[in-house]
Amino acid sequence: MAGNSDPLSPRAKLAVTAGKAVAAASRAAGRGSGSVIGGRVALKLDPDLLARLAQNLDVILVSATNGKTTTTRLIAEALRAAGPVVSNALGANMPAGITSALAGSSDARYGVIEVDEKYLAGVARDTAPKCIALLNLSRDQLDRAAETRMLAENWREGLAGSKAVVVANCDDPLVVWAASSSPNVIWVAAGQMWKDDAWSCPSCGGVMQRPGDDWYCGECGFRRPTPSWALSGDHVLDPHGSAWPIHLQLPGRANKANAASSAAVAAVFGVPPQVALERMYQVQAVAGRYDVVQFQGRDLRLLLAKNPAGWLETFSLIDPPPAPVILSVNARSADGTDTSWLWDVDYTRLTGHPICVVGDRRLDLAVRLEVADQHFQVYENLDQAVAACPPGRIEVIANYTAFQDLRRRVGN
């Protein structure tokens, strides 16, 4: 554990103070949490501030295409059994937002940090993490983050020789290839529902063979490593073969997988699986995700899905037909402006659901649903869509900025 005896320099203190002041002004102006703009100002005044803030913490980094915000929250809850935790719980996961989060606590022992996939190598270099959790890699914002194999290569190069304990999902070939450059890896069998980005070998380009849950490349021999932790139904299997029950308030298999990885991370810091998993039960929602809210006299469950893999997981946990579904898609800068990913989503899984479509890019989505032979209606806004929905709890699925718009509209 790092000590707290090394105070910040006057320059660093000034940067922290200025960042907090700017963030507060942003909040007062109604422009969000202010964490990003506050972090940018602080880093402008002290470019090394992130490294200075991290030096007194045991840092855990969490990166993935899907599930990193939830897993960060689960790890943070588990590690609170061992000491105070600071975390970027609201998902501001680039250097500015991370800097703001770490500047918000002076007495924490652990820093549990969600990191955008594109920034993982740089943040790891600045924060000297004790542990890095790698969950999955799939196509997402191709106009910004590039192709998945390029991201995996960036991870692999950035983590080569890292002193961190890497907790990695052995069921995702891209994650395995990226993590294999690290000398100390703990493999977790967390599963992989979306496989369409992992049919070619990341090592040699050959065709991957996928018998059952296993995978291997028949050309170069690259294969799934043997896990020491595993998700098995409603239990986490630890390295000793003991099965620990998972009781979560968060829905779906994907969150059980997140819990399995989180338990493996917590164990690195001496928190037993039973304690870690019991603490994870306290998490009811994550930055509004999975919340059930009242709006216009109806129950709405808010679900975030930002890319094909995320939509696939979300479809697996919604109420069965004829539960009404509202879909909302934007294509603003935070989402990625390229909506071609809509064609990678299997919308036939919504057959039997009454579907309402809203959002900036509702017509793009309408074309995709038409091709998928789904029955839907397009509406100008959430109010109209909710009014048109038949009885029953409404499942509302939205991508990133559409989700934020919806939360503001329902007062969540």
Image: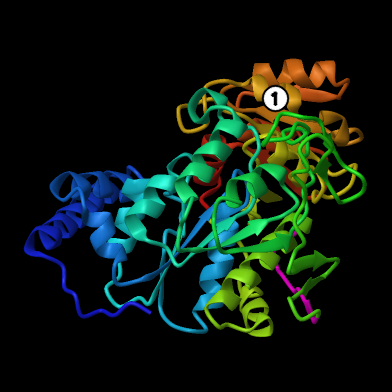
What is the magenta range? 242-251
Instruction: Indicate left or right for 391 with 72 as reference.
Output: right
Q: In this view of the protein, which residue sits in the foreground, 160 or 46?
A: 160
Judging from the image, what secondary structure is the residue with disc 1 in? helix
- Prevailing SS of the magenta stretch: loop
Tell me what residue is drawn at x 72 percent, y 47 percent: 172
**Mark 1, residue position:** 342
Q: Position of residue 193 (x, y in %)?
A: 79, 45
Q: Amino acid at mark 1?
A: Leu
Q: Quadrant of residue 310?
A: top right
Quarter assignment of residue 274: bottom right
**At which x and y percent is residue 405?**
51, 38
Nearer the observer, 296 or 9 = 9
Q: Is 13 located above or below residue 56 in the figure?
A: above
Counting from the top left corner in percent of width and height, residue 232 is at 84, 67
Circle 1: is it few (<14), some (14-19), or many (20+) Cα within 10 Å? some
**Where's the N terminus, which quadrant?**
bottom left
Decide if residue 378 is in sight here.
Answer: no
Q: Nearer the viewer, residue 379 or 251?
A: 251
Q: Is residue 31 visible?
A: yes
Tally the numbered discs. Answer: 1
Query: Does residue 314 sit above or below 182 in this rendering?
Result: above
Identify the residue shown where x is 76% and y is 37%. Answer: 220
* Residue 152, placed above or below residue 266: above
**Was residue 387 drawn as part of the magenta stretch in this picture?**
no
Q: Is residue 16 left or right of residue 307?
A: left
Rendered residue at 77%/61% (across/down):
226
